[in-house]
Amino acid sequence: MAAVETARARAQAVLRIRGRAVAAAVLPAAVAVVLLAGRVTGRLGAPGSPDAAAWDAVRWAVCAVAAATLLVAGLVARARRTAAVPQTPAVPLSRADAPELYRLIGELADRLEVPAPSAIALTPDCDSWLEDVPVPRTGRRSGRRRADTPPPAPVLVIGSPFLWWMRAGELRALLAPVVAGTAAAADPDIAAARRFVRGLDASLDSGSGSVDHGSALGPAAGRPARRGTRLLTDRITRRLLGACREHSAELERAVAGWASEQAKAVDYGLRIAAQEQVGLAYAGWDRLLTRVALPAWKLGRHPCHLNAGVVAALTELSRRDRLAADGYGTRLGDRPACDLLEEPGTVDTAVSLLAAELFFGAPEGASATGPATTPAGPATPVGPAAGRSVADRSAAAAAEGWKELDWADYPTEVVDLGWRARAAALQAALDRLAPQARPGAPTLTRLLSRLSEGDGEPLAAALASQLARTGRPSSLLEPARSGRDLLVEHVTAMVCCAAVDTAGGTPGLDWLDGPVLLIGGVRRTDLAEPVAQAVEQGQDGPLRAWLDAAGVRLEKPVRL
C-alpha cells in the first residue's frame, strides 16, 4: 500500500533528523578525542615540536566547544525527556464499566486485523481519536526496556454524544477508521517519530499549562517567556520542530489514508449514513452546552445527564426540522450505543462533570485549590489513562463546589433562580443610576419609566460596570456582549419574574433554546421584540401592551 510506505518513509525522515541532531552534538567531542589521542601518541603536536603550541591551542578550543555543545545537547535532551506530553482530559472506562463496548471494539479490531486499543475513555466532545499511553520513567534503565518492548497500544477516546445519539452499528462503523489507526501506532518507526516530535513540542509547552490538540508543529503562541539557557534550548527545539514540520504533517496524512483504506472493508455503507449523524450530533451538543448547560453552570449547578439531554435536544430538532427528521423513525428500532455501558446514567454523570470543568471551570465561589481553573482545561494535564474514574467523579463534584442537577429541577433551580438573580442585578444598577430617597420595592413601573425617559444607555453602562466588578470572566462558550445586550437580557428576566409572580407564568426548559417563559402552558416567543424596542429606542408602548395582554401587573413588586 502506497500510504503505508509513505508513512514509514516520512517517519524515517524524522528519525534521520533526530540522528543528525545527535551527530552534530557529538561531533565536536569526537574531534576533541582525536586531538587528545594525537597529543598522547605524539602524532599531533608532540611535546617539543615546533607546532606543539599551535596544536595545544587548537585542542583547548575544540575541547571547550565540545564541552559547551554536550552541555547544551544534554539540556535539550533533558527538557524533552522530562516534559509531560499534554493529554486530553477524559473519563476512563474500565472493562467492568462497559464490557459490551470493549467486546465490540475488540471484534472490530479483529475484523480490521489490527491491534485492539489498550483502553477506552470518553470525552465531552463530538470527536474520536487514539491517544498514546504515556510510558512511565522509572529509572536510568527504563529507556533500554522501552526499546526492547513494543509501545503499548493507544487508548481509544470516544466523544460521549456519539455514544448516546448513535445506534450501536453506526458507532462501530464510525470508529472503524479510528481503530484502524492502531496499526500505525504499533509500527516502531512511526511510534518513535511521533514520540520525538511530541516530546519536542511538550518541552516548549512545559510550564504553560496549555493543552494543544492541534499539530505539534504549530506556532508557540501563548508559551511562557524563557531566559538564559532555556531560551537557547527552546531555540534549538524550535529549529528541530521546523525541520520536522513537513515530514510530520505528511506522516499523519499518510496514516489517516492508511487507516481509511483499511476501514473500507468494514461497514462502509453504514459509515456514510453515520457521518450524517455526526454533524447533527455536533449541532445538538453545541446548542445544549451554550443554551442549556451554561446558564446552569453559572449558578453552580451541573446538569448530571448532559448526554441524555442531547438526545432530547436532537429528538426535539427532528420534530421541528424536516431534514433532521429524515430517517429518525427508522433508527429508533436499532439498539442505542449507550446500551453497551453497564450503567449509562453513572457514566453520563461523570462525563457531564468533566464537561463543566472543561468548558466553564470551577463554580462561583469555589476554592482556588480546585482542579479546574480555566475553561481551557485543568492546570495539570489529565489523560484518559490517568483521569478520575467514573466512581471517583461523583464524589469529586460536591468537593469542588458543584451541585448536581436533574433535568426535572431545571426550571426551578436554573430558570427561575437565574431570572431573579438578573432582576436583582438590574435593580441594583437602577438604584445606582437613580437613587431613591426611600428605597422601594422593585417594580416594572419604575423600570419602564426610566427606559421611556431615555435612560437606556446610562442604565446599560451601569449594569455592565456592575457585572464586570462582581462577575467572573466570560466562559469560552459565551460570546462577548455589549452593555445594551446585557440590559435586554436583564429586562427580559425581570419581565419574566413579574409574569411568574402576577400572571400565573411558569419557568420552562426548551431543549434547543434553554430557559423559556410559559403562560397558560404555552411558550411565549413574542417578548424579545418589545423588550428590544424599550431598551434601544425608549419606546415602552409595545412592551406595556404585551404586559397588559399577558395579565402582568406593573405596579406589583417583583420577588427577587
Image (spheres, grey):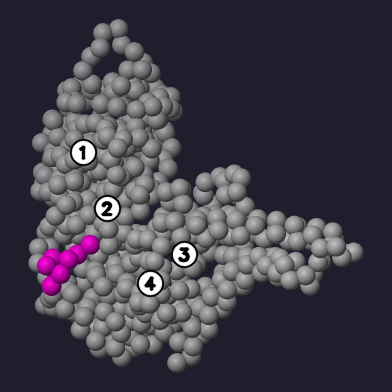
Disc 1 is placed on an element classified as loop
Q: Is residue 456 visible?
A: no
Quarter occupied by the C terminus: top left
Disc 3 is placed on an element classified as helix
Distance from the alpha carbon under mark 2 to that under mark 3: 26 Å
* Quarter of the figure with residue 466: top left
Residue located beneath label 1 in the image? 401
- The earlier-in-sequence mark between 1 and 3 is 3
Nearer mark to the viewer, of 4 and 3: 4
Distance from the alpha carbon under mark 4 to that under mark 2: 35 Å
The amino acid at mark 3 is Arg
Q: Which mark is residue 355?
A: 2
Residue furthest to the top in view is 437
The residue at the point 13 percent across, 65 percent down is 97
* In the displayed structure image, the side of residue 481 where residue 287 appears, left or right: left
Q: Which mark is residue 146?
A: 4
Nearer mark to the viewer, of 2 and 3: 3
Q: Position of residue 17 (x, y in %)?
A: 59, 73
Residues rendered magenta in the picture: 92-99
449, 80: nearer the viewer: 80
- Is residue 347 shown in magenta? no
Q: How many marks?
A: 4
Disc 2 is placed on an element classified as helix
Q: Position of residue 239 (x, y in %)?
A: 62, 62
Q: Is residue 528 visible?
A: yes
How many residues crowd around disc 4 within 10 Å: few (fewer than 14), some, or many (20 or more)?
A: some
Q: Position of residue 170 (x, y in %)?
A: 23, 78
- Is residue 95 shown in magenta? yes
The residue at the point 19 percent across, 31 percent down is 498
- The earlier-in-sequence mark between 1 and 4 is 4
* Quarter of the figure with residue 446: top left
Residue located beneath label 3 in the image? 198
